[in-house]
């Protein structure tokens, strides 16, 4: 293209681009001296096609040693006016911003701007005086027709002087010299560590004693057999071939008699009833049957009854024992109660349920047991032959959580060798092709629902047509709660009476809508929250009937999506979104995301209406959006960390975890599997051959995430079980809920609450708060409207459960002496040390550093063990901390939220450098060198493999003592995990027991002394 063909605007744009490029090439070559500034000014004038600087600055005073610099002096040092004005179009604001950084850095005011008005002058009515004390005392003055013009001209003079003296770089002040900056950056690359002479002597004495004992025992501990483990008090519901015949005959007779009296006459109008004979026929001829039936057709309640009734009619009722797995506890309980009521029986006869913390088990012979998938898996671990079970039903298989997929994998292999057991897979919205291909089953479709449900999308809802909710706004959590309230009002005012079920992403949204509804002028409303972490008693309230003049409104997450029938629900409002934690294998970080549900989920939600009358569902997405959604939900195994899946696979199968997981219905990513195996090796749970270590053989018994399970095992060894048990229970249960509450006010209240108990450790604060509640018998730990996320009773039950797990693991010597197990429970640093040893997760604070291009000694940059930048969430006691008794923190949960751009550490505790060294996992590497440029004194620098953000520095003698002590400490831990519960060890290892006592005495003393400033702040 010819130059003459280019438009004027294009020419100007190209010219500006060429100028910018020329500056980038030429400016760096100017030397920083007065002569070069002369050429630099000429350069700027040339490229801008202007004469050299010729500004009409009135006065310029340089107050330094009593001298004054004239305007001509200023002109000789000043860069081109137009360029500086282009760089800082608002010079006064730019100068204030620069000095705000300076003021904060130096903790004093270094800029003052004053004005004087001369009413007599026509052209210079206002005069601006700018006084600065950094980098030295200087004043700049200029005049203008008004204050704004005068201040801009004076500010430009000040900026020019700062640029001249190299005090501004990339629009940021340069407070420190390059040499100082390098010194501070270098000095924080390591943390000094020291020992008092007494501690050093005591550690050396222990080292000498250790060399004289041998860590061996006459016999290894006899571990608890898998078949001997009792899962939460549940018996195995197994049939015994030696049962007296008269008992079997009596049971069969009782079942037959009851069937003839009540059940035989109990015929319902559920659509599935017309398919009863076909289903039984298919089941007779197939070991595996997939039943696909619409929501409300009666699958969950009727199919188990079809099966057991067929046995009862043949006088063989005692031979039939059915396990029905449900994805949620509320479904297992409500279905069991419904079926028992329908059969006119009490819970605990033919029908029962088993969920965590609660169970009503049926009779041993002739039973239907509804249980959660988690309970089912625990049953498999303790009873892999499923003794006495004749039928397994996997209900709501479309949900595809990890536990359901693990069950499918196990049962696929199990059925090959147990041809007498039948498997029934049921769902309304299942991917039949996928299941048929995986498990070689026949599909039977049940058509029809009891009552029709009319489906509405945004386009169809009158009150949303003018101001609709967009798909993007919902994902960004800009839910128009006011509009949902309007929709509820409209339903109540224009539709026939009926309950309303509203699906929301999480607790925060439930809380927001709950508050709005309470503040409306609508009367006769019963508003009930429904969330997975509400207590069973609070969940069950949604099933209670209400008087005719009351409108029941249930605000629920996806807990209400399947397998439950709330009889008076006639209308469903569905936001179409949910919150879920998704694991990112690239960043090795979980994130809390708000995402759209699948078409399958929406159909399930629709199906909650119309159970007793014709209903309607209102979905707050457009029909086009619905058509573009995934047809089925993404399996959980593709969205989570796989450490627990690997452990489960090693318990169920003796082969390699990757082989087991690759044969699941949807195999996980191999990278994720390898990462999980590697993490378990780092934690010491698996060895390099992928076998359970001694620690792993204990961890596999504990129903907690691996890191918390490891913490429990170590707490037994270090004799501080109670506090670690409380922390593990709180984090395993409460944090699932608290993570979904990302509300400023809630986080601030939670932080204030914890600060009452401890100022540097969230974990110690939670323990103290929990202990205080136990004393006060206050049931609420984290309060929420109309119910509690976590209460004292829940934590106590969890503690009982996990103490039982620990006993089954074999790490606690029997009989258990609680005083012995909690001898060091008051040592806060030991508690924090165990948490760190169990996670190897560490944050290092760097005081100095660059923030947005500005070097500051108040940077407080936080880096985790992988040297990734992290921030502390505002619910932590260490959020926005100003005083730091230690630069090292440990944490349990690090997450990314879709409402924040940073990685957030949810919980933190300061720990001492000594703790970080002694309790870190990983091999040690050491090197020698000077600690500065101007000294020949050599120190030892210690690096821990796997902790990239931290280097320790100490004297060579201290390094030798600490590292030897660290080695002995963990050799003792490994030995005690394997042997302490063995009675023979107790009898023949007196020397080792004495050594352990001395070791714990020295260790706890050292930890307490090293953390004195942390706990006394």
Image (cartoon, rainbow, N blue to C red):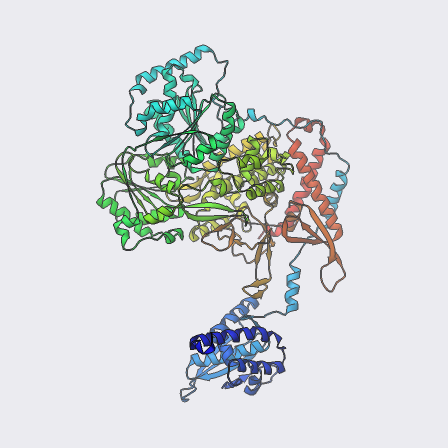
The residue at 50%/86% (across/down) is: 58
Give the number of marks. Answer: 0
Q: Is residue 845 at least partly visible in the picture?
A: yes
**x, y percentage for residue 875?**
48, 51
Q: Can you say whether 544 is above or below 679 in the image? A: above
Q: Position of residue 373 (x, y in %)?
A: 46, 32
Whether residue 822 appears in this view of the structure is no
Residue 864 rendering spot, x and y as whole percentages: 58, 52
Work out whether 527 lies above or below 55: above
Q: Is residue 182 left or right of residue 276?
A: right
Q: Is residue 260 left or right of residue 753?
A: left
Q: Residue furthest top?
A: 246
Most extreme residue toward the front is 1
Q: Relative to the observer, which residue lies in front, 626 or 575?
A: 626
* Above or below, comparing residue 601 to residue 810 in the picture: below
Residue 501 at what x, y percent from top left?
32, 41
Residue at the location (74% across, 48% down)?
960
Residue closest to the eye, 722 or 382: 382
Please identify the quarter of the rendering in which residue 496 is found: top left
Seen from the viewer's position, the closer of residues 9 and 961 is 9
Q: Quadrant of residue 453?
A: top left
């Amino acid at each position: 293209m010819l130059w003459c063909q280019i438009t004027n605007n294009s020419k100007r744009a190209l010219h500006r681009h060429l100028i910018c490029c020329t500056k980038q090439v030429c400016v760096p070559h100017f030397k920083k001296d007065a002569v070069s500034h002369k050429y630099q000014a000429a350069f700027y004038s040339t490229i801008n096609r202007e004469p050299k600087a010729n500004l009409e600055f009135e006065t310029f005073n340089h107050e330094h040693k009593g001298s004054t610099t004239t305007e001509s002096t200023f002109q000789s040092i000043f860069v081109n006016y137009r360029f500086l004005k282009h760089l800082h179009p608002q010079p006064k604001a730019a100068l204030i911003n620069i000095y705000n950084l300076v003021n904060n850095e130096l903790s004093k005011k270094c800029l003052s701007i004053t004005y004087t008005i001369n009413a007599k002058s026509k052209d210079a009515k206002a005069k601006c005086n700018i006084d600065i004390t950094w980098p030295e005392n200087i004043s700049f003055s200029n005049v203008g027709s008004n204050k704004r013009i005068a201040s801009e001209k004076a500010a430009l003079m000040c900026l020019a002087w700062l640029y001249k003296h190299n005090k501004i770089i990339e629009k940021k002040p340069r407070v420190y010299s390059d040499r100082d900056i390098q010194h501070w950056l270098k000095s924080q690359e390591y943390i000094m560590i020291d020992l008092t002479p007494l501690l050093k002597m005591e550690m050396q004495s222990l080292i000498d004693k250790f060399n004289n004992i041998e860590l061996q025992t006459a016999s290894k501990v006899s571990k608890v057999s898998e078949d001997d483990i009792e899962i939460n008090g549940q018996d195995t519901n197994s049939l015994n071939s030696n049962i007296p015949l008269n008992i079997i005959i009596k049971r069969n007779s009782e079942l037959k008699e009851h069937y003839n009296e009540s059940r035989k006459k109990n015929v319902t109008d559920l659509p599935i009833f017309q398919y009863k004979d076909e289903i039984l026929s298919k089941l007779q001829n197939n070991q595996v049957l997939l039943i696909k039936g619409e929501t409300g057709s009666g699958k969950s309640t009727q199919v188990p009854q079809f099966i057991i009734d067929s046995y009862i009619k043949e006088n063989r009722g005692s031979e039939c024992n059915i396990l029905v797995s449900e994805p949620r506890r509320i479904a297992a309980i409500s279905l069991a109660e419904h079926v028992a009521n329908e059969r006119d029986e009490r819970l605990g006869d033919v029908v029962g349920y088993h969920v965590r913390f609660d169970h009503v088990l049926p009779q041993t012979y002739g039973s239907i047991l509804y249980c959660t998938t988690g309970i089912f898996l625990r049953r498999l671990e303790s009873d892999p032959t499923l003794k006495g079970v004749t039928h397994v039903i996997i209900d709501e298989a479309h949900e595809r959580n990890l536990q359901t997929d693990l069950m499918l994998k196990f049962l696929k292999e199990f059925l090959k060798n147990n041809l007498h057991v039948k498997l029934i897979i049921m769902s309304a919205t299942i991917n039949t092709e996928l299941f048929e291909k995986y498990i070689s089953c026949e599909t039977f479709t049940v058509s029809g629902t009891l009552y029709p449900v009319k489906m509405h999308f945004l386009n169809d809802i009158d009150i949303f047509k003018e101001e609709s909710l967009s798909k993007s706004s919902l994902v960004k959590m800009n839910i128009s709660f006011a509009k949902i309230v309007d929709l509820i009002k409209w339903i109540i005012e224009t539709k026939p009476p009926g309950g309303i079920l509203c699906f929301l992403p999480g607790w925060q949204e439930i809380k927001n809508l709950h508050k709005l509804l309470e503040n409306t002028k609508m009367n006769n409303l019963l508003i009930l929250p429904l969330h997975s972490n509400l207590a069973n008693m609070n969940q069950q309230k949604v099933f209670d009937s209400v008087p005719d003049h009351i409108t029941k409104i249930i605000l629920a997450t996806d807990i209400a999506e399947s397998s439950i029938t709330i009889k008076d629900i006639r209308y469903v409002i569905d936001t179409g979104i949910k919150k879920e934690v998704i694991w990112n294998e690239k960043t090795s970080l979980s994130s809390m995301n708000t995402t759209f549900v699948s078409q399958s989920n929406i159909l399930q939600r629709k199906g909650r209406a119309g159970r007793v009358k014709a209903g309607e569902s209102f979905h707050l997405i457009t029909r086009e959006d619905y058509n573009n959604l995934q047809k089925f939900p993404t399996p959980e195994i593709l969205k989570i960390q796989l450490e627990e899946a690997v452990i489960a696979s090693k318990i169920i199968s003796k082969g390699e975890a990757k082989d087991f997981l690759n044969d699941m219905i949807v195999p996980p990513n191999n990278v994720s599997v390898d990462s999980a195996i590697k993490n378990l090796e780092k934690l010491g749970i698996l060895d390099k051959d992928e076998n359970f270590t001694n620690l792993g053989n204990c961890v596999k018994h504990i129903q907690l995430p691996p890191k918390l399970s490891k913490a429990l095992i170590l707490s037994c060894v270090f004799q501080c079980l109670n506090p670690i048990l409380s922390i593990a229970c709180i984090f395993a249960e409460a944090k699932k809920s608290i993570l979904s509450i990302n509300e400023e006010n809630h986080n601030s209240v939670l932080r204030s609450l914890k600060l009452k108990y401890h100022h540097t450790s969230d974990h110690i604060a939670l323990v103290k708060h929990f202990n205080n509640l136990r004393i006060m018998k206050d049931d609420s730990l984290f309060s929420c409207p109309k119910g509690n996320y976590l209460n004292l009773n829940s934590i106590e039950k969890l503690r009982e459960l996990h103490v039982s797990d620990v006993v089954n693991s074999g790490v606690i010597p029997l009989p258990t002496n609680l005083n012995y197990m909690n001898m060091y429970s008051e040592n806060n640093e030991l508690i924090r040390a165990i948490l760190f040893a169990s996670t190897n997760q560490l944050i290092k604070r760097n005081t100095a550093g660059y923030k947005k291009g500005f070097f500051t000694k108040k940077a407080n940059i936080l880096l985790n063990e992988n040297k990734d930048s992290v921030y502390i969430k505002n619910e932590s006691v260490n959020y926005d901390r100003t005083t730091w008794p230690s630069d090292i923190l440990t944490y349990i949960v690090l997450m990314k939220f879709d409402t924040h751009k940073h990685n957030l550490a949810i919980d933190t505790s300061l720990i001492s450098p000594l703790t970080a060294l002694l309790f870190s996992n990983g091999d040690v590497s050491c090197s020698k060198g000077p600690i500065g440029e101007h000294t020949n004194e050599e120190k030892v620098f210690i690096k821990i493999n796997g902790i990239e953000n931290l280097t320790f520095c100490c004297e060579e003698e201290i390094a030798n003592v600490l590292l030897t002590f660290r080695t002995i400490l963990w050799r003792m831990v490994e030995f005690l995990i394997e042997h302490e519960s063995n009675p023979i060890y107790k009898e023949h290892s007196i020397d080792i027991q004495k050594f352990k006592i001395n070791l714990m005495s020295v260790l706890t003393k050292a930890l307490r002394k090293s953390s004195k400033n942390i706990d006394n702040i």
